[in-house]
Structure formats: structure tokens, C-alpha cells
Image: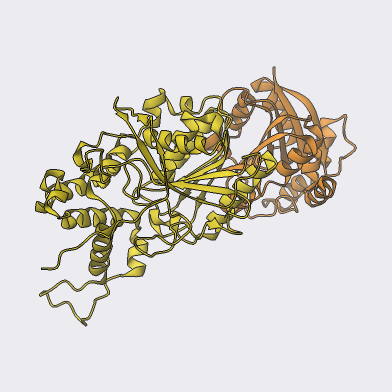
Chain colours: A orange, B yellow
């Protein structure tokens, strides 16, 4: 009963992953960096007939994904992308991880070397609540999204939506699609204005390609 | 003095290939005998066959009692009804390697003139072992194996299967192995070989003429090798500095538990394993270098249709995780479909044979996924 499986997977999949899944074309070759237990991979393989592969830094999650029959390797964005050949994938996905990698700029470059398209989601540091807390209290912001103390957060490279646009411009990446969303992954109505999205969007999702 | 005697010979199930095999060293080895065991049933489409490759001192009795030693199958925790490699679903084949001493053609087997090959046995490679297995698999009319699975030297054979016969392997699981034998690996093997060579009972390899076996040398070789299979943590946990039959070290005799354990390992091993076979197979492992065979490791897997599952164990210092990771990266460079996990275990290289639930779940999931993809 493939239909019930798909419903089950989709229901349990993070909402931002559903938004990502919408961007993937059927039958595509996909690499999901930071794939966790492989919920998105499984969905893409079942629902889109994708050749879906993953990289996961957490060994327990990677083992769960492999035990589910998925093509997942234990590894990380900073160290493992360099070993893939050029244009090996149609889509390379990095969800909610860019802010935690050691070299975000190099990771993006590698993603667009090995993939035709890169799909990147990240929490937006430009959100009004973050700005307000920093401005008003003079302390590092603590919100639903940014919820770990500065001394223990894995998020070492936070950026805003406008920062990300600027990096894409500088490194010659074409923004094919973008959207801002709230924490529940619901699309937000600031579709036309990066300035407004940067103020009100908690999460950002970009689809990029090389120039 | 009581001599250690080998176990009495038994007749192992086998197939004979009259035309034999052209070896990498240029010798035509004919006829060729391949001793093997099978479990489960081959389906009508012949699409559910899984080949298990054994390690240096293993044999074809992967999932049943070994007829000589009376011990359980060496991978009976993994291969069997309802297990990760489910013999209710799959037709499992395991063959004694070429050069081995459990019924396949090797130094201990007799030639046409009735004398054993002994040191006249030609030099063999891991690829020769795989070619011998291919003859057996072909004889079953199996065009493509659902999976080839093996650990340590068995993993080397798995890699060689995928590189040499890519169309014949749908899924490959090289476990706790590497693309080549490292200098350290070779060095440990050389200590073992030197121990055999220096045993007065070795008689330049013609010990059977004297009715002897180089038990001391082979035993020492096994003891050294056994240390490399274990981690320091495993040895400490198992033995520590525990004494045997004494409350304090007396400086008069050997009393540490670990000493008697190693001696037992050595003395039980020599009853079932032939010294010339040990020399032949350890050399085959030392020669193994997949990237040298193919120009580069990625080249060995170029355009491969095979899907891979690579697993290493965190405390394995004989075939460390870095070697498995290098394999994975080469497979990625070849755009192969690969899964990779490093299993957390403090049991060293031996962990691949032991009850490691995470490993079994991951490997089982991989095999089940391959079966599903093929509609088996």
C-alpha cells in the first residue's frame, strides 16, 4: 500500500521539508545534507521516484536511516562534499544546517558544483524579535528559533535573509525561488519584499543555481 | 610428549570444475574444487542469492555447526531464519576460499599424484578467490547475486566482486575492511609467517612427510593475529591483569589470564588450520590493492551499477574507520549509491562477528532494501 506509506511519512515530516519536497522534480537525483533519519529521502523516493541519497552527521540517525534501507552515509557538509563529482545531482538540499557549518560559503560552492540546483533553508537572524531583543536588552537573543545560549549553540554562522541575498550576488548564484516562512513552515505573505521578509520571516528557503 | 594432532578429515560438500582457473600469477589451476554450503532455497527467477565471503581463518560453515570443531556457525547471529540475512527469504551461499583448507583446492589438498600441494601451491590473489566463487555461482545458473557480504578478508572479496563482476552484484556489503592491506597489516602477517617458518616442525613446508604439524609456529601466528582482532578495551575488560590460579604474581610462572587465553586460541587453531594454507592466504591479503589494480580507487567503481553498504567499528585498529571512509569517498566519486555507518563498539576488529544489534539492523535494512528494489 504505497499510498498509506506516503501519507504516513508526509504527516510526520517537518513542514519545512514539505516545502522543500515541493521544489523537487520527479525522478530527480537528490542529495540531502543533514538528512536526519531520512524522512525526506524516503518521501522523495516513494512520492517522486527520486534517486535520493543522504549525509548525516549524527551516527544514531544515520544508522536508523541505513536500517530503513536508505542510501545514507555518516559524514558532514564541511568534509564530504568535495569527494562527489561535478553535477552528480539535480538537487542538493541543506535544511536548517547552513548556520551550523564551519565554512558556509565553501559548502554553498560545493553544493552548486555537485548539484544543478541547491535548496537551502536557514533560520533568519534578521527577524524582528531577534533585532528587538538585541537592541532592547543588549543581550544575545533567545527565541523559539534561536534557543541555545551563545556559549553552547551549534549555530556559529547566523545570517539574515538580506545577508544571504548579498552572498548569492557576490558568489554568482542565481536565486530561482525564495520564500520566508514562520516556525511552523507556513508560507508568509512577504513574497515580494525581501526587506519585509527579513523582518517578519522566521525561516528562509532558497532555491539556487549557478549563473 | 603429546603431539597436537589435526582434526580427522571430513568430506566437505563441494563442486569440481575440470577446466579450472587461470590464476593472476599465470598458472592454470585445474581441476579446481570449491567446497561450499548453502542455506535456504533458490527462487524460480534465481534472483534471491546472497553470497557470504569468509575471513582469513573462516570457512563455509557460516550458519551451522562446524563439523571439525563442533562450534556454531561463525556468522550464525547474522545468517539464519528471520535474521538480518534471512535464510527463509534468501538463498545463501558460502564457499571455502581458494587456498583454504576446508575442502577447496589449496596447499593441504592432494594433487593427482597423491601428494599434497604444500609449498608448490601457486601464489593466489583475492581476485583469484573471487573468480573461483564466480565459477560456483555460475554453476547454480545465477546471473546476478542479490548481495555479496563479507567482513575483513571477506570484505576484500566483496570489493573485488564489485570491481571485477559489477553486473553480477546488485548489492555489496564490505564490512570492517579496506581497499588495500596497509604496511602495518603486512607487518603483523609477516610476524606470523616468520613464526611458522622458524618452527623446526615446519620442515621447509613438507611437514606432512614427517607426520608433524608446525603447531608452535602456527599457534604463535594465531596468537599475534588474535591480538590485532581485539581492542585494548576488550582485552582489559575481559582479562585486565587477572591471575589464573594464583593470588599474586610470583615471578616463577606465567599466571595472567590473558596468557592462557592466547595459548588456548593458538592451540585450538592449529588442529583445524593448515600452516601452508595460512601462509598462502595471508600473502593473498598482503597483495590486495584495489586502486593499484584499477589505476585509482574511484576507477575501480567507475559507472558501477552496484549499491554498497560500508560499515566499520569504532575500536577496530586493524581496519580503522578511516579506511572505510576512504572507500566511501571513492564510491561517492564514482557516483555509486552507498550507505556508510561506523558502529560504536569497544570490541575491536572482532566486533563484526559479534552480537552488535545496530550493525545487524543496518545490514539487515540494507539487504531488505536491495531485495525490495529487485522485487524479491
Say which of B95 and A141 sits in front: B95
- The part of the image, by quadrant, that contains residue A168 is top right
Say whether residue B65 is left or right of residue A186: left
Is residue A82 visible to the viewer in this orientation of the structure? no
**Can you give x and y, in whole percent of width and height, for residue A208 in the image?**
72, 26
Say which of A33 and A1 sits in front: A1
Say which of A62 and B255 sits in front: B255
Is residue B314 visible to the viewer in this orientation of the structure? yes
Give me the residue at 15% from left, 55% from top: B212
Say whether residue A62 is left or right of residue B327: right
**Can you give x and y, in whole percent of width and height, for residue B156 in the image?**
41, 40
Count of labels in the image = 0
Say whether residue B145 is left or right of residue B353: right
The N terminus of chain B lies in which quarter of the figure? bottom left
Question: From this viewpoint, which residue is outermost toward the right?
Answer: A189
**Can you give x and y, in whole percent of width and height, for residue B275 in the image?**
22, 49
Question: From this viewpoint, which residue is outermost toward the top?
Answer: A211
Say which of A8 and A161 sits in front: A8
Question: From this viewpoint, which residue is outermost toward the front?
Answer: B113
The C terminus of chain B lies in which quarter of the figure? top right
Give me the residue at 57% from left, 46% from top: A57
Give me the residue at 16% from left, 71% from top: B254
- Is residue A208 placed above or below B284 in the rendered structure? above
**Can you give x and y, in whole percent of width and height, for residue B351 in the image?**
43, 57
Say whether residue A70 is left or right of residue B181: right
- The part of the image, by quadrant, that contains residue B119 is top left
- Is residue A162 placed above or below A16 in the rendered structure? above
Amino acid at each position: 500500500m504505497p499510498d498509506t506509506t506516503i501519507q504516513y511519512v508526509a504527516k510526520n515530516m517537518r513542514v519545512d521539508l514539505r516545502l522543500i519536497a515541493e521544489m523537487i522534480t520527479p525522478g530527480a537525483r537528490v542529495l540531502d545534507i543533514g538528512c536526519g533519519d531520512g524522512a525526506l529521502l524516503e518521501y522523495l523516493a516513494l512520492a517522486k521516484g527520486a534517486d535520493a541519497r543522504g549525509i548525516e552527521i549524527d551516527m544514531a540517525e544515520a544508522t536508523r536511516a541505513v536500517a530503513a534501507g536508505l542510501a545514507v552515509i555518516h559524514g558532514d557538509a564541511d568534509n564530504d562534499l568535495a569527494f562527489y563529482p561535478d553535477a552528480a545531482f539535480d538537487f542538493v538540499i541543506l535544511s536548517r544546517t547552513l548556520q551550523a557549518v564551519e565554512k558556509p560559503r565553501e559548502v554553498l560552492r560545493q553544493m552548486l558544483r555537485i548539484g544543478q540546483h541547491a535548496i537551502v533553508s536557514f533560520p533568519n537572524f534578521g527577524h524582528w524579535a531577534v533585532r528587538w531583543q538585541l537592541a532592547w536588552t543588549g543581550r544575545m537573543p533567545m527565541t523559539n528559533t534561536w534557543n541555545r545560549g551563545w556559549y553552547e549553540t551549534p549555530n556559529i554562522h547566523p545570517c539574515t535573509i538580506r545577508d544571504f541575498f548579498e552572498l548569492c550576488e557576490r558568489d554568482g548564484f542565481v536565486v530561482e525561488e525564495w520564500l520566508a516562512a514562520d516556525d511552523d513552515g507556513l508560507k508568509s505573505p512577504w513574497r515580494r519584499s525581501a526587506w519585509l521578509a527579513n523582518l517578519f520571516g522566521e525561516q528562509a528557503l532558497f532555491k539556487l543555481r549557478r549563473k | 610428549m603429546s603431539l597436537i594432532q589435526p582434526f580427522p578429515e571430513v568430506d566437505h560438500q563441494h563442486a569440481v570444475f575440470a577446466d579450472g582457473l587461470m590464476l593472476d600469477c599465470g598458472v592454470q589451476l585445474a581441476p579446481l574444487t570449491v567446497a561450499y554450503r548453502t542455506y535456504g532455497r533458490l527462487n524460480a527467477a534465481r534472483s534471491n542469492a546472497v553470497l557470504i565471503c569468509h575471513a582469513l581463518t573462516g570457512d563455509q560453515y557460516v550458519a551451522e555447526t562446524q563439523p571439525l570443531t563442533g562450534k556454531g556457525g561463525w556468522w550464525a547471529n547474522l545468517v539464519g531464519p528471520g535474521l538480518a540475512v534471512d535464510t527463509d527469504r534468501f538463498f545463501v551461499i558460502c564457499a571455502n576460499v581458494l587456498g583454504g583448507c576446508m575442502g577447496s583446492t589449496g596447499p593441504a589438498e592432494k594433487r593427482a599424484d597423491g601428494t599434497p600441494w604444500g609449498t608448490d601451491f601457486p601464489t593466489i590473489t583475492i581476485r583469484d578467490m573471487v573468480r573461483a566463487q564466480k565459477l560456483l555461482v555460475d554453476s547454480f545458473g545465477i546471473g546476478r547475486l542479490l548481495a555479496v557480504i563479507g567482513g575483513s578478508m571477506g570484505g576484500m572479496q566483496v570489493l573485488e566482486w564489485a570491481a571485477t563482476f559489477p553486473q553480477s552484484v546488485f548489492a555489496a556489503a564490505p564490512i570492517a575492511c579496506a581497499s588495500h592491506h596497509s604496511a602495518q597489516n603486512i607487518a603483523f602477517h609477516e610476524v606470523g609467517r616468520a613464526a611458522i617458518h622458524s618452527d623446526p616442525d615446519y620442515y621447509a613446508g613438507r611437514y606432512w612427510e614427517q607426520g608433524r604439524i608446525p603447531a608452535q609456529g602456527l599457534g604463535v601466528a594465531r596468537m599475534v593475529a588474535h591480538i590485532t582482532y581485539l581492542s585494548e578495551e576488550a582485552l582489559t575488560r575481559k582479562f585486565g591483569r587477572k591471575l589464573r590460579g594464583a593470588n599474586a604474581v610470583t615471578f616463577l610462572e606465567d599466571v595472567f589470564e590473558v596468557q592462557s587465553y592466547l595459548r588456548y586460541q593458538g592451540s585450538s587453531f592449529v588442529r583445524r588450520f593448515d600452516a601452508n594454507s595460512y601462509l598462502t592466504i595471508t600473502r593473498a591479503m598482503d597483495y590486495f590493492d584495489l586502486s593499484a589494480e584499477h589505476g585509482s580507487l574511484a576507477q575501480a567503481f567507475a559507472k558501477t551499477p552496484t549499491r554498497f553498504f560500508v560499515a566499520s567499528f569504532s575500536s577496530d585498529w586493524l581496519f580503522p574507520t578511516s579506511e572505510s571512509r576512504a572507500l566511501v569517498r571513492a564510491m561517492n566519486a564514482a557516483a555509486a549509491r552507498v550507505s556508510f555507518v561506523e558502529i560504536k563498539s569497544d570490541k575491536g576488529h572482532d566486533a563484526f562477528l559479534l552480537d552488535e544489534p545496530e550493525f545487524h539492523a543496518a545490514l539487515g535494512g540494507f539487504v531488505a532494501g536491495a531485495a525490495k528494489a529487485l522485487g524479491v
